[in-house]
Amino acid sequence: MTGAVTSWPGTGAGRPPAQLPVPGLTLGEGPCWDAATGALYWIDGPPGRVHRLDVHGLHASWEVGQPVGAVFPRAGGGLLVAASDGFFALDTETGAAKLLVPVEPDRPGTKLNDGACDRAGRLFAGTMAADESPGAGALYRLDADLTLTQLVTGVGISNGIGWSPDDRLMYYSDSLAYRVDVFDYDPATGAISGRRPFAPVGGGEVMPDGLAVDAEGGVWVAQWGGSVLTRYDTGGRPAATVRFPHANVTSCAFGGPGLDRLYVTTAAGAGHPAGGLFVLRPGVAGLPSYPFGG
């Protein structure tokens, strides 16, 4: 399957995304490139499955035992998984998953969703209500010593997170707000402040999902229900649109040796019994994904 891409001046973009031959996904999410091993990780949320595609094109997967929202390589080896009960360590050799940090144990109706690690290895991820009730979620920061700090409350569906090339801004999408916001970011401490709107996204059944930032500061936002991935310039203006055959475009991450490939996940729905993993060359390099722990 292929979609279509609208290019913008100077990038050479224009080739459609290609779907990779990996197992179909109920709710594909959270692609994450591990530069240390040349592998791509992503998740299938409801079945609680973590996937990997290595540098040789070999696929592997692991079961966590509960729904998952995101996956991150750990600097010390193995993976960190954001799941319903909290953050788990996943041993890729044995497949064992161990709860490291519970999140909202007094609120069984919420679960962790999307997230990302900053350059220092701090992990930012948020929660949402399992029934998608507005305002039930929160945004957290998990430091390398496993200290968990609540940063934002009243979140609808906590979703994409990314940083500007100079690490001075952090972008954040709350799907139910139909908007990507931006914070001032302190890379020394991981503190956020000055939240303000960056770009309105979607409306009705179309809403912002995961995001990634490129080396020029462009913010790529997946649109659930919209069949598109949109690039916004540093002023929050739409600059390019990539179209997909699936309605539910969920997340994206730059990868490959030159970070010049954009990997995109989709979910089942709207006539498609399974989501998939796509790749395209957008004509601009991206920022790397960082492992948890620094």
Image (spheres, rainbow, N blue to C red):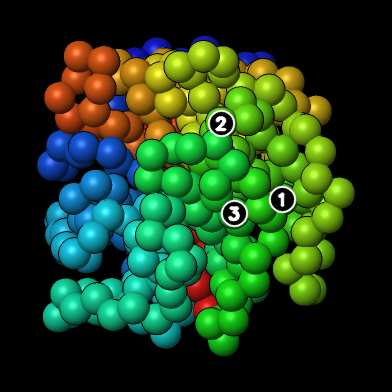
| Marks 1,3: beta carbons within 8 A | no
What residue lies at 28% left-to-right and 39% top-to-bottom? 27
| Marks 2,3: beta carbons within 8 A | no
Q: In this view of the protein, which residue sits in the foreground, 47 or 36?
A: 47
Q: In this view of the protein, which residue sits in the foreground, 120 or 159?
A: 159
- Which mark sits nearer the N-terminus, 2 or 1? 1
Q: Amino acid at mark 3?
A: Ala
Identify the mark at residue 138; answer none if there is no mark: 3
Q: Secondary structure at mark 2?
A: helix
Circle 1: is it few (<14), some (14-19), or many (20+) Cα within 10 Å? many
Q: Amino acid at mark 2?
A: Leu
Q: Secondary structure at mark 1?
A: strand
Q: Position of residue 248 (x, y in %)?
A: 36, 25
- Which mark sits nearer the N-terminus, 1 or 3? 3
Q: What residue did someone put label 1 on?
A: 170
Q: CA distance from mark 2 to mark 3?
A: 13 Å
Q: What residue did someone put label 2 on?
A: 176
Q: CA distance from mark 2 to mark 1?
A: 19 Å
